[in-house]
């Protein structure tokens, strides 16, 4: 009976170690599989992963052109509209005419429509050439309303060695008294980047946004004043 007792004692002492070793091996194997899956998701750029990057915030300042008229009427700026891909926080780049990608590790601090609205509002406010200007819904009794549709906000190679920051906006000036379109125009600004690096591309966006803002602000004042001088 003693040999049997010794055998049982050794078996019961070894079993927990075997179970622990098996559990460790299974845990390590599971961890390896999990790491492999996570690595795969990271390479694919899955939405479930967070990548470190730089946030850019273009903030152009536009000086009033001496040719801009001084007007007494008031303007309300409606929230700008855009397609979802155009109004993304990711910085879009078009390497070929039929292909749209985004720069990895870089994003905008605000959607492009907000950047456009803020730039136009600031340019008109700082110009001192208009009676009053504010966002729609702010309580201002506007005589006119500016409606903008952002069609393009992307870095476009267009067959060149470096991309150009390209911004296209369709703008309508509505006369609120009769809800008629006083004027309508499409604006386009394109500024080539100094090189292909993201900071250089962002700098070209800042310049292009300043260009299109200057065009829109001046057009609003001129078109609105021309409409005011017409019988209606």
Image (cartoon, rainbow, N blue to C red):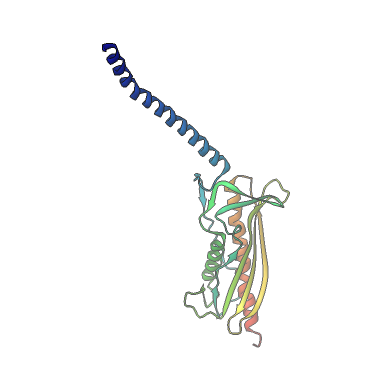
**Front-lying residue, 14 or 169:** 14
Q: Quadrant of residue 24?
A: top left
Residue furthest toward the left? 2
Q: Quadrant of residue 2?
A: top left
**Front-lying residue, 107 or 21:** 21
Do we see residue 92 in this rendering? yes
Q: Tell me residue 151's x, y (percent).
A: 64, 62
Q: Tell me residue 66's x, y (percent).
A: 61, 70
Q: Residue at x 53, y 63 (%)?
A: 114
**Front-lying residue, 44 or 55:** 44
Do we see residue 66 in this rendering? no
Q: Is residue 112 above or below residue 146?
A: above
Q: Tell me residue 87's x, y (percent).
A: 58, 59
Q: Is residue 57 above or below residue 105?
A: below
Q: Residue at x 68, y 67 (%)?
A: 186
Q: Is residue 41 above or below residue 150?
A: above
Q: Tell me residue 18's x, y (percent).
A: 37, 23
Residue 64 left/right relative to 187? left
Q: Residue at x 50, y 55 (%)?
A: 109
């Amino acid at each position: 009976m003693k040999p049997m007792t010794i055998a049982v004692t050794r078996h019961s002492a070894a079993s927990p170690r075997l179970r622990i070793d098996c559990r460790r091996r299974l845990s390590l194997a599971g961890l390896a599989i999990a790491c492999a899956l996570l690595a795969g998701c990271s390479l694919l750029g899955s939405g479930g992963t967070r990548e470190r990057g730089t946030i850019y915030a273009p903030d152009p300042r536009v000086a009033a052109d001496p040719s801009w008229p001084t007007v007494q009427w008031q303007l309300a700026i409606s929230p700008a509209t855009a397609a979802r891909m155009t109004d993304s926080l990711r910085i879009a780049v078009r390497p070929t005419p039929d292909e749209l990608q985004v720069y990895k590790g870089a994003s905008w601090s605000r959607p492009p429509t907000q950047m456009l609205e803020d730039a136009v509002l600031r340019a008109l406010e700082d110009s001192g050439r208009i009676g009053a200007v504010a966002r729609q819904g702010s309580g201002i009794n506007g005589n006119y309303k500016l409606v903008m549709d952002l069609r393009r906000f992307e870095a476009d190679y267009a067959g060149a060695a470096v991309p150009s920051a390209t911004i296209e906006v369709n703008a309508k000036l509505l006369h609120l008294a009769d809800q008629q379109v006083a004027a309508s125009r499409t604006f386009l600004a394109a500024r080539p980047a100094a090189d292909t690096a993201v900071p250089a591309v962002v700098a070209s966006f800042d310049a292009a946004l300043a260009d299109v803002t200057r065009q829109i602000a001046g057009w609003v004042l001129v078109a609105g004043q021309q409409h005011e001088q017409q019988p209606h």
